[in-house]
């Protein structure tokens, strides 16, 4: 069970890595899944834009891209790319701390890997509710 963090062209000092890893493991277990490999890459807008163009054929900035690489249904194996630039900007827009927004985005990626979606309005409502629950648990 490996959770790894990588930083490409950016620095984040808002993470308590060991606490976050343990929390993620607990939440994934609550979803009846097991982590095989999870890589979370913190990057810049430009880095993530290249990925967005190359793999999703989208030509816009985004805060997160999640790749589910699992071959087994109950296994988490994936990569989460997070634009620290977008996290900072979204924190300002939403009047929340960068720390809060960063963790919301991380949890959003975890929820995607657990099988939750946010394409429809009802799915977005559920996703936001789950993100809020994770944030409350994590920071309490």
Image: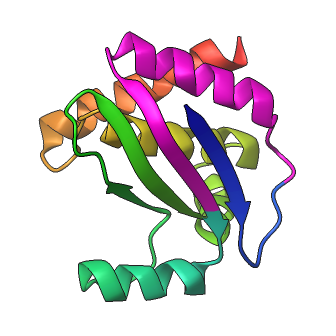
Q: Which quarter of the figure is the C terminus placed in?
A: top right
Residue in view at x 24 percent, y 35 percent: 115
Residue in view at x 58 percent, y 53 percent: 40
Q: Which quarter of the figure is the N terminus placed in?
A: top right
Front one among 110 and 74: 74
Residue in view at x 50 percent, y 63 percent: 63
Front one among 104 and 8: 8
Q: How is the image coloured?
A: rainbow
Measured along the vertical axis of the image, is residue 34 above or below residue 56?
Answer: above
Task: Report the label total.
Answer: 0
Residue in view at x 37 percent, y 37 percent: 76
On whether residue 31 falls in the magenta region, the answer is yes
Left or right of residue 91, residue 106 in this image? left
Which residue range is magenta in the image? 13-41
- The picture places residue 58, in percent across and down from the top left corner, at 28, 83
Front one among 4 and 9: 4
């Amino acid at each position: 069970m490996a959770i790894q963090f990588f930083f490409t062209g950016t620095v984040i000092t808002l993470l308590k890595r060991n606490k976050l890893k343990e929390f993620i493991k607990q939440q994934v277990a609550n979803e009846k899944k097991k982590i095989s490999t999870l890589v979370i890459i913190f990057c810049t807008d430009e880095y993530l834009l290249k990925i967005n163009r190359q793999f999703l054929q989208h030509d816009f900035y985004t805060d997160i891209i999640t790749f589910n690489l699992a071959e087994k249904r109950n296994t988490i194996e994936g990569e989460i790319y997070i634009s620290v630039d977008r996290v900072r900007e979204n924190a300002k827009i939403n009047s929340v701390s960068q720390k809060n927004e960063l963790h919301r985005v991380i949890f959003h990626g975890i929820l995607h890997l657990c099988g939750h979606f946010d394409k429809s309005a009802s799915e977005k409502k559920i996703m936001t509710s789950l993100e809020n629950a994770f944030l409350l648990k994590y920071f309490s």
